[in-house]
């Protein structure tokens, strides 16, 4: 039997003093600094949207051009030219390839088209292209003039056709749909009641009756390449000022068919 005595074990303890409140505040602060964020107030509301749509500018031929003998002394000139008001009568030329023009004759070329203008602040300028043929192709004894009709109403009296084909005609899109805006038409512009309008351009060629000798005999004068062109412009109308560098177009007044 052993009589050895084990050494006593001494356990030293230290009282931990808890700092009430401080540890909780410190711990809470460390937690917030570790990744949490404050959620600030915000709000949203839906608003009504809309769309912006482009308008339209177009000109399309209704049918092939037609040619008419409108000589004043032709007794069978009893037909109304298409698209006109009946103030000019003529006899249709069935085959221009075989018809021969002589001094004193007057021929009419009729071009029918539909003009489309849709858009606020839209004004279109109508011109005739293809009149500047190559030298030597034109009969210099023919004097050219024109008239413009819209929906069968003559807009201007017969006038000399400018060499640049400028008919002097401007068309404005209808006022309806402009959201209270004023019309873009003025004395220079024909305001359209609808987005489309039937337009007829009549080009007259009158062979000078005083042509002498054999002047201009067998000269061929081609009109087959003529075309009507509609271009947007922004230099006319109530809201557009004509630049100083541009000569204003003379106002066009409707003409009484009986004049």
Image (cartoon, helix red, strand yellow):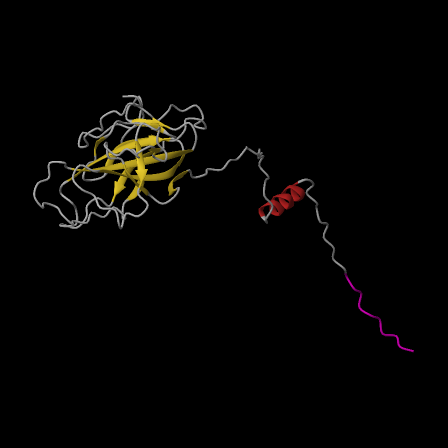
Q: Viewer-proximal residue, 112 or 243?
A: 112
> Could you tell me which quadrant the N terminus lies in?
bottom right
Does residue 162 appear to the left or right of 110 in the view shown?
left
> Could you tell me which quadrant the C terminus lies in?
top left
**Residue 168, above or below 58:** above
Q: Is residue 26 visible?
A: yes
Residue 110, percent across and down?
Answer: 31, 39
Q: Viewer-proximal residue, 45 or 48?
A: 48
Q: Quadrant of residue 43?
A: top right
Residue 211, percent across and down?
Answer: 10, 39
* Residue 6 lies in the magenta stretch: yes
Magenta segment, prevailing SS (helix, strand or loop): loop
Residue 220, percent across and down?
Answer: 19, 49
Residue at image position (23%, 39%) is 165
Query: What is the magenta range?
Result: 1-10
Does residue 49 appear to the left or right of 164 in the view shown?
right
Residue 203, percent across and down?
Answer: 26, 37
Residue at image position (49%, 37%) is 51
Does residue 2 appear to the left or right of 155 in the view shown?
right
Q: Quadrant of residue 187?
A: top left
Q: Viewer-proximal residue, 186 or 203?
A: 203
């Amino acid at each position: 039997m052993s009589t050895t005595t084990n050494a006593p074990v001494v356990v030293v303890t230290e009282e931990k003093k808890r700092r009430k409140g401080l540890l909780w505040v410190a711990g809470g602060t460390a937690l917030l600094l570790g990744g949490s964020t404050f959620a600030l107030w915000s709000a949203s509301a839906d608003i009504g949207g809309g769309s912006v749509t482009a308008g339209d500018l177009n000109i399309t031929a209704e049918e092939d051009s037609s040619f008419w003998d409108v000589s004043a002394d032709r007794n069978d000139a009893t037909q109304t030219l298409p698209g006109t008001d009946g103030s000019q009568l003529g006899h249709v030329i069935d085959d221009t390839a075989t018809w021969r023009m002589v001094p004193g004759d007057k021929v009419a070329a009729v071009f029918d088209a539909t003009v489309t203008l849709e858009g606020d602040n839209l004004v279109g300028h109508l011109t005739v292209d293809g009149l500047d043929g190559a030298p030597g192709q034109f009969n210099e004894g023919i004097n050219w003039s024109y008239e413009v009709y819209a929906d069968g109403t003559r807009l201007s009296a017969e006038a000399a056709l400018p060499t640049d084909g400028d008919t002097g005609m401007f068309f404005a899109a209808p006022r309806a749909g402009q959201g209270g805006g004023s019309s873009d038409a003025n004395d220079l512009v024909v305001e359209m009641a609808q987005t489309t309008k039937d337009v007829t351009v009549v080009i007259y060629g009158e062979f000078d009756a005083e042509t002498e000798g054999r002047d201009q005999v067998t000269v061929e004068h081609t009109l087959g390449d003529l075309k009507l062109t509609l271009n947007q412009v922004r230099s006319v109308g109530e809201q557009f000022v004509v630049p100083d560098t541009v000569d204003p177009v003379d106002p066009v007044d409707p003409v009484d068919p009986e004049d």
